[in-house]
Amino acid sequence: MTGRTPQRRIRGTLVGVAGLMILPIVAPGPAGAQVDPAGRDGMIRSAVSAAPDEVSRSATVRDWQGNVLREGTNGWTCLPDMADQPGDSPMCLDPVWMAWVDAWQNKKPFQADRVGFGYMLQGDFPTSNTDPYARESTPDNQWIENGGPHVMILVPDAIALEGLPRTPHGQGPYVMWEGTPYVHIMLPVPRKP
Ligand SMILES: [Cu+2]
């Protein structure tokens, strides 16, 4: 996810974070232009469930096509669960993470210019801990079928990753996608009620 402002427009192809789903993304038009109101309310409820109220309450909410469902004021962007992915995986992301998403989805270089935070307090979609684009379990890709709620942390300098486990071991933070531009820290936390 390279622009650093919440107003930045996402262009190119947006795929599900696990890389399983490829959706065309349009530059956001008038707020919620092609979104029916019932669907919009459900997506907003899903999206804001990804972060603590103090974060999600004033966040911008977008759907996965880039439409703004609700304008926000605090620089955070919340995205709803991806309907055709298993699991419940809405997310609320800061501008560093939004730039990361764009890079990851479009297989572009990425370098965090500061610490970035993302909340996924409902859970995760199935993914590999070693391969950002894996679509299924292999003997050595540390497949995570039922990822739990977590906070995601991007760091500008890999030295900050020193000493952290490289595997999801069920006992605290670990590093995901090491050796790729998309490396980040996963911090398991309780589910948001
Ligand atoms: Cu995540």
Image (cartoon, helix red, strand yellow):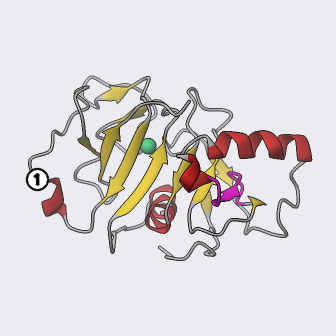
Magenta region, residue range: 57-66
Residue 51 in the image, given as x and y percentages of width and height: 53, 46
Placement of 20 over or under 182, stated as above or below: above
Q: Which residue is drawn at 50% across and 61% down?
A: 106
- Does 186 sit left or right of 67 as displayed? left
Query: Is residue 63 within the magenta segment?
Result: yes
Name the residue nearer the viewer: 177 or 50: 50
Total label count? Answer: 1
Residue 95 in the image, given as x and y percentages of width and height: 49, 68
Q: Can residue 35 be seen in this view?
A: yes
Q: Quadrant of residue 158?
A: bottom left
Disc 1 element: loop
Q: Which amino acid does label 1 sit on?
A: Glu
Query: Is residue 190 within the magenta segment?
Result: no
Placement of 35 over or under 94, stated as above or below: above
Name the residue nearer the viewer: 117 or 36: 117
Q: Residue at x 28, y 29 (%)?
A: 142
Q: Which residue is drawn at 37% across and 25% down?
A: 137
Q: Main secondary structure of the magenta part?
A: loop
* Ligand 1 contact, mark 1 (Cβ < 8 Å): no
The residue where tag 1 is placed is 162
Residue 125 in the image, given as x and y percentages of width and height: 50, 32
Placement of 17 over or under 62, stated as above or below: above
- Does 112 sit left or right of 35 as displayed? left
Q: Quadrant of ligand 1?
A: top left
Looking at the figure, which quarter contains the C terminus?
top right
